[in-house]
Amino acid sequence: MTHPMLEWQEGDVTRSLRWQSESGLRPPKRVVIADDTLNADSAFRLASEGTGLLWRGDFQNARQLLQALTRRIERKPRKTSAIPRESFNLHRQAQSQRARTLGMLLVEVDADYGIGLRRAPDIRLACNEAYGASSGAFVVPLREILGLIGAHEWRRKGVEIAELEARIHPWYGVFSPIRGEYLALIAEAPLPARTLAFDIGTGTGVIAALLARRGVSEVVATDCDARALSCARDNLGRLDLLDRVQIVEADLFPPGRAPLVVCNPPWIPARPNAAIERAIYDPDSAMLRGFLTGLKDHLTPQGEGWLILSDLAEHLELRSREELLQMIADAGLKVVARMDTRPVHARAGDATDPLHEARAREITSLWRLAAA
Ligand SMILES: C[S@@+](CC[C@H](N)C(=O)[O-])C[C@H]1O[C@@H](n2cnc3c(N)ncnc32)[C@H](O)[C@@H]1O
């Protein structure tokens, strides 16, 4: 991957370093040096204009400044519309603008993943986990460093998965099964066979683990993302299931057919604002379409495909139920049964969330599909 460079003036010297942004933010064209003497209002004005603030003060003060900038953004009234799709688009635009503004507070990280600021945390392990071996010093939005630290903590502690009676450890950038209500559906749905299953887009490996724990003797789990593949291997190893679960890099399906093929694709057909959103947002439902289109050719006779899908996109009027049913029919499939659940995550009950109305009605389903 080639990284753009960030250039700035510091005293009499022109300096430049590699720009690092996992969220895909472009380097700011103008950068000023900032420290503890900069007040939040001035910082907010500069950041809103697109001026990068390269921090040379105390690390914890920078963290507080970021919170002050966040409060200023949140104070602004939100634009909404009576039309759900428009409301969603306004919400996404606001999120993207917020990410740009908050991404203007920058820190320099040296080639050993050290931060040369007062009261800076040790982020070497978090950086090694997220970025791999260092390829030299770089400048990065502080917000991304905080994300990295948070991800390191999640990975260390893991997420308790009731259906596994164990913890799954999500890695940086890998979809975390934190809203795990769909796992209860996978734990309950009648297994068509216990011989072999495919888990398409395995992420942390949670579904593959669950199928193996339910007694499926061989599971092939795929993903196209390098971090997900390593993360799934790590989790299956921790659960001592690597003798039954094979993790392979593939675009959707592994070769061959199975009596059970499970997939939990991204559920919102919209452009992701950042790479780490790709597990949720997928333009034109590409993975969903790919899964449905290829499913029949990867099922054994009497085999079942289990599609996990939230209907949030339907409430946002981004994809209709008719469209989904048409996609199923066009793929030569029929619906055997559908099992529904309601999300229990905190945001479903949060009335201040701009998508509250849609989220409050959200249902996640396990669609049992078979060749028509
Ligand atoms: C919503 S996440 C689900 C992860 C996991 N199955 C779970 O339920 O927690 C979707 C996953 O599909 C993967 N993915 C996206 N497109 C893919 C493709 N064409 N082939 C294989 N995996 C893909 C992503 O990397 C991501 O890990």
Image (spheres, helix red, strand yellow):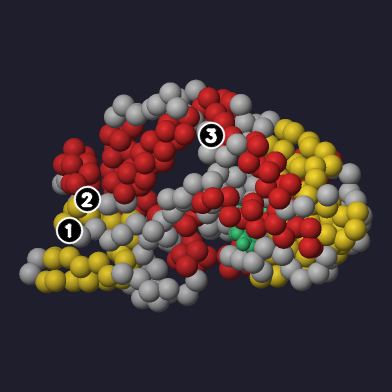
The residue pinned by badge 3 equals 317
Q: Nearer the viewer, residue 188 or 266?
A: 266
Q: Is residue 157 above or below residue 313?
A: below
The x, y position of residue 79, in whole percent, is 34, 29
Residue at position x 34%, y 57% in the image? 25
Q: Is residue 296 left or right of residue 69?
A: right
Between 27 and 143, the one lying in front of the other is 27
- Closest to the observer: 298 or 278? 298
Give amino acid for label 2.
Answer: Gly
Say what secondary structure mark 2 lies in: loop
Question: What quarter of the picture does the N terminus occupy?
Answer: bottom left
Q: Residue 81: percent from the left, percent from the top?
A: 40, 26
Callout 3: few (<14), some (14-19), or many (20+) C-alpha neighbours within 10 Å?
some
Q: Residue 321 appears in which quarter of the rendering?
A: top right
Q: Earlier in the sequence, mark 2 or mark 1?
A: 1
Give the alpha-carbon distance from disc 2 to disc 3, as whole Å.
33 Å
Crowding at mark 1 (Cα within 10 Å: few <14, some 14-19, many 20+): some
Q: Secondary structure at mark 1?
A: strand
Relative horizontal placement of residue 65, taking residue 121 as reference (left or right)? left
Question: Does the rendering let one see residue 242?
Answer: no
Q: Residue at x 45, y 27 (%)?
A: 83
Q: Amino acid at mark 1?
A: Arg
- Residue 295 is marked as none
Rounded to the nearest angstrom, the CA distance separating label 2 from label 1 is 7 Å
Find out whether the residues at labels 2 and 3 contact each other: C-beta distance under 8 Å: no
Circle 2/circle 1 CB separation < 8 Å: yes
Residue 62: x and y, percent? 29, 48
Query: In the rendered structure, which amino acid carries the disc numbered 3?
Result: Glu
Residue, disc 1: 30
Residue at image coords 79%, 58%: 296
